[in-house]
């Protein structure tokens, strides 16, 4: 029964790792990400939703004494 020749494994693995890294980087470059919206007035910041304008009270549970 012939033995498995592992002499080329080192060069195969060492060339595969940078190749996989480069392929991953190239695929990530092609992806489209959403850009953050630009604010028109930088001095006046108004929240977009009504939840940011309201304050809510935090009540203690009934089991605790005040």
Image (spheres, rainbow, N blue to C red):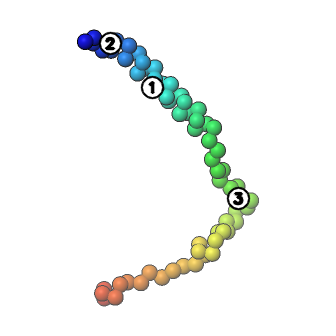
Q: Where is 14 relative to 25, above or below?
A: above
Tag count = 3
Q: Nearer the viewer, residue 49 or 55?
A: 49
Q: Where is 23 relative to 40, above or below?
A: above
Tag 1 and tag 3, C-beta contact below 8 Å: no
Mark 2–mark 3 Cα distance, whole angstroms, equals: 63 Å
Quarter of the image where one finds residue 4:
top left
Nearer-N-terminus badge (1/2): 2
Near mark 2 (Cα within 10 A), the count class, few <14, some 14-19 or many ≥20, is few
Q: Residue at x 35, y 84 (%)?
A: 61
Near mark 3 (Cα within 10 A), the count class, few <14, some 14-19 or many ≥20, is few
Q: Residue at x 59, y 74 (%)?
A: 51
Q: Is residue 43 left or right of residue 11?
A: right
> Is the C terminus in the top left, top right, bottom left or bottom right quadrant?
bottom left
Q: Nearer the viewer, residue 23 or 39?
A: 23
Q: Where is 57 relative to 2, above or below?
A: below
Which residue in the rendered view is the most extreme toward the front?
1
Mark 1–mark 2 Cα distance, whole angstroms, equals: 21 Å
Residue annotated with mark 2 = 5
Q: Residue at x 64, y 71 (%)?
A: 49
Residue 56 picture location, percent across and down: 51, 80
Residue annotated with mark 3 = 39
Single out the mark in the foreground, 1 or 2: 2
Residue annotated with mark 1 = 17
Tag 1 and tag 2, C-beta contact below 8 Å: no
What SS does tag 3 mark? loop
Q: Where is 49 relative to 37, above or below?
A: below
What SS does tag 1 mark? helix
Nearer-N-terminus badge (1/3): 1
Residue 54 picture location, percent across and down: 58, 78
């Amino acid at each position: 029964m012939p033995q498995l020749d592992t002499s080329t494994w080192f060069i195969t693995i060492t060339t595969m790792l940078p190749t996989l890294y480069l392929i991953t980087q190239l695929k990530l470059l092609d992806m489209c990400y959403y850009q953050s919206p630009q604010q028109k007035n930088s001095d006046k910041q108004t929240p977009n939703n009504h939840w940011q304008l309201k304050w809510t009270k935090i009540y203690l549970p009934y089991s605790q004494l005040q």
